[in-house]
Image (cartoon, helix red, strand yellow):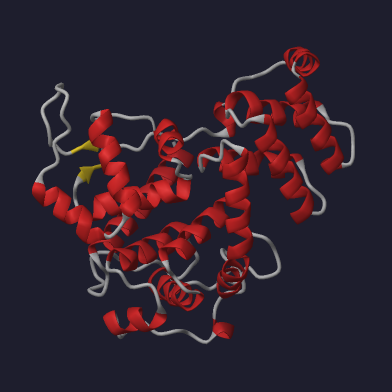
């Protein structure tokens, strides 16, 4: 992430322009102000994981602070986001290497014993690789991994290797790197349960726990102040505009409302009177299962679409064209 040009390089003073200070004060976001001070002190480039650790922020707090700084236009984002770690990018550890580490490292051995207890069986080679990847590649400490496994054991029946992998990547991505981070995160997740369950219901996903990707998105909505009724309005606007379910499109609608500081159904309908809730029974039963969904609106012909929606639909059309060309190439 890059700062706007604020101060000359070098020197022993950190200079803050008065108009920037006024914007930070007006935002009322202490985390945003703290992050901005960190940016000035650390110069124009920093490592997110190090920043979160030194500032004592988890991923959710850090991203809210970043959003504040972008919203009040005191920082600029890089042109391309740095890709986050994914399972396919992990090193190819050998079974011999993992076995040797388990024998030599009592902390990793404790993680393996905890996993066997949660899974209810001896670890397979693939399960051992998943745990070692989380421990070595993602850098999750043993006590954090044991807390993660205990959480899965309480919440899921049965627990699978895939569950462990997905949750480990989520925790690493959110910067949960200490036992205190884990305790804070798990307490927050417990408090969010009723709100997220209601959001799952209005999105026609009731009766199951959100997967890690869904949880992170819904948790961000909760912390931004959105209600389940507001999510229902976004869902209806998504179906009216697109004719099908799309997490990215839903995120786009809610992000624009967040930028306009409207988070409840009352605030949204006051801003956009045309947005109304559709009777729940008339909606598709589940994401991606709308057999008679209308085609996406033509971005050049629908006057109701906002600029970001036109851009999004053009990108979708281009993606579909490329896929067709590749299939016929």
| Corner quadrant of residue 146 | top right
Q: Is 126 left or right of 91, judged from the image as shown? A: right
- Picture quadrant of residue 106: top right
Can you say whether 115 is above or below 193 in the image? above
Q: Is residue 233 left or right of 3 when viewed as pictured?
A: right
Q: Position of residue 87 (x, y in %)?
A: 59, 32
Closer to the camera in the image, 185 or 173: 185
Residue 53 percent location from the top left of the image: 46, 35
The answer to whether residue 162 is visible is no
Q: Residue at x 43, y 38 (%)?
A: 52
> In which quadrant of the rendered view does residue 171 lie?
top right
Q: Quick check: can you spot residue 134?
A: yes
Q: Residue at x 70, y 64 (%)?
A: 208
Going 64% across and 44% down the picture, which residue do you hit? 167
- x and y percent of residue 121 in the render? 90, 37
The residue drawn where x is 29% and y is 54% is 68
For the C terminus, the image quarter is top left
């Amino acid at each position: 992430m890059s700062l706007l040009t604020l101060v000359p390089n070098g020197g022993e003073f950190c200079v803050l322009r008065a108009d920037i200070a006024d914007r930070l004060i007006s935002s009322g976001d202490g985390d945003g102000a703290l992050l901005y001070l960190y940016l000035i002190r650390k110069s124009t480039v920093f490592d997110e994981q190090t920043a979160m650790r030194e500032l004592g922020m988890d991923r959710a707090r850090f991203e809210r602070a970043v959003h504040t700084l972008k919203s009040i236009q005191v920082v600029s984002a890089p042109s391309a986001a740095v890709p986050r770690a994914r399972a396919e990018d992990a090193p190819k550890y050998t079974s011999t290497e993992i076995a040797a580490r388990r024998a030599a490292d009592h902390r990793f051995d404790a993680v393996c014993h905890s996993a066997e207890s949660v899974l209810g069986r001896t670890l397979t080679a693939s399960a051992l690789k998943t745990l070692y990847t989380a421990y070595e590649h993602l850098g999750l400490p043993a006590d954090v991994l044991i807390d993660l496994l205990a959480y899965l054991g309480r919440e899921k029946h049965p627990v699978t290797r895939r569950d462990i992998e997905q949750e480990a990547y989520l925790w690493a991505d959110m910067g949960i790197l200490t036992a205190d981070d884990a305790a804070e995160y798990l307490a927050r997740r417990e408090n969010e349960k009723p709100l997220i369950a209601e959001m799952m219901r209005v999105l026609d996903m009731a009766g199951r726990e959100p997967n890690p990707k869904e949880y992170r998105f819904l948790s961000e909505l909760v912390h931004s102040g959105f209600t389940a009724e507001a999510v229902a309005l976004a869902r209806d606007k998504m179906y009216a505009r697109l004719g099908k379910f799309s997490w990215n499109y839903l995120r786009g609608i809610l992000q624009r409302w967040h930028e306009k500081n409207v988070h409840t159904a009352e605030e949204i309908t006051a801003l956009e009177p045309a947005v109304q809730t559709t009777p729940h029974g008339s909606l598709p039963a589940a994401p991606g299962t709308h057999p008679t969904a209308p085609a996406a609106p033509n971005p050049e012909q629908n006057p109701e679409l906002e600029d970001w929606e036109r851009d999004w639909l053009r990108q979708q059309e281009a993606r579909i064209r490329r896929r067709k060309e590749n299939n016929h190439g």
